[in-house]
Structures are given as C-alpha cells and as structure tokens.
Amino acid sequence: MRRTDHRELTRAAGIWLLAGVAGCSGVVDFSNQGSACLVSGDSETFDQALDEGASTVFVEMVEGFGSNWQVEEASCDVTVHGSTIRVRSRGKLRDRGGPEMEDLRYLTAGCPGPLLTEGQWTLAYGGHSVSFAVPGDADVCVDSE
C-alpha cells in the first residue's frame, strides 16, 4: 500500500492525536479516515492470488501508534453504484495505559471488492475519489484528506 514520505511527522501527529482525542475515556473512533486502495487480480503489488476481474480493498485508517493501544475494531465495506466503488471504514482503538511504546503499528482493514469489468471506474473514500480504467490501472488508491 502507498505510504507517505512524512512517516516521522505522521507518527508524531498520530500519537498526539490519539493521546488528545482519547481523553478520559481512553477510546478513539475512526470513520472513513486515511487511505483506501483497490487491488485487482492484475496487480503485482501483493502476493495473493485473485481470480481474473476480482478485487480486494485495503484501508489504512491510522499509522504510527504504539502497542499500548489495543485495536477493538477495524472493518470496511464496499458498495457499487453504477461504475462508482464506494468504500466505508470504521475503526476503534483503546488506550491500555502505561507509557507510549515506540513500536510502529497500523490500523488497517481489508474487504472484498467488486468484480471489475472493462471500462472506466471511480473509487470513492472519505469524501474524495479517483477514476481509473480496466484494463489498465492495476492498483488505485485514494486518500480521505
């Protein structure tokens, strides 16, 4: 999956965000945040076998949190309306307490994508979208920011 070049800044911002948003409850909810990538059977990005035309969606909601955070939920779903593939995601992290750990973890989810037929498609996530062609673009990603 595509990663930003600002990993340290993103990690620091993620830790700050988690610490600030969790507040007293210790729980942080995420909805349609981060990036979503559609991987087709034509892709060479992931070492997985997909049938011709099949696709999978991977969502990365948060990057850069430590193991003192417990993943309570990480899910996504895909709906198709005409040639638009709409991805929705939901995630939840709970602070277990204690010092911030220095390991780097990601809140991710995967879900089955649609059967891709030849033509123009649009991948929509978090209020943004990107168009792509089949055959042609093997991997397509869209950021919610």
Image (cartoon, rainbow, N blue to C red):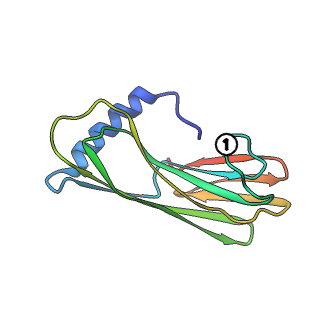
Residue beneath the point at 47% across and 28% down: 6
> On screen, 34 above or below 13?
below
Mark 1 surroundings within 10 Å by alpha-carbon count, few (fewer than 14), some (14 through 19), many (20 or more): few
Helix, strand or loop status at disc 1: loop
In which image quadrant can residue 134 be found? bottom right
Residue beneath the point at 77% across and 62% down: 116
Tell me residue 69's x, y (percent): 27, 46
Q: Nearer the viewer, residue 128 or 42?
A: 42
Name the kind of residue labelled 1 in the image: Asp
Tell me residue 54's x, y (percent): 74, 60
> On screen, 72 above or below 69?
below
In which image quadrant can residue 82 be found? bottom right
Q: Nearer the viewer, residue 30 or 74?
A: 74
Question: Is 128 positioned to the left or the right of 70 in the image?
Answer: right
Tell me residue 67's x, y (percent): 29, 40
Question: Is 113 positioned to the left or the right of 145 in the image?
Answer: right
Q: Nearer the viewer, residue 36 or 128?
A: 36
Q: Which residue in the structure is indicated by mark 1?
A: 47
The N terminus appears in which quarter of the rendering? top right
Tell me residue 14's x, y (percent): 34, 39
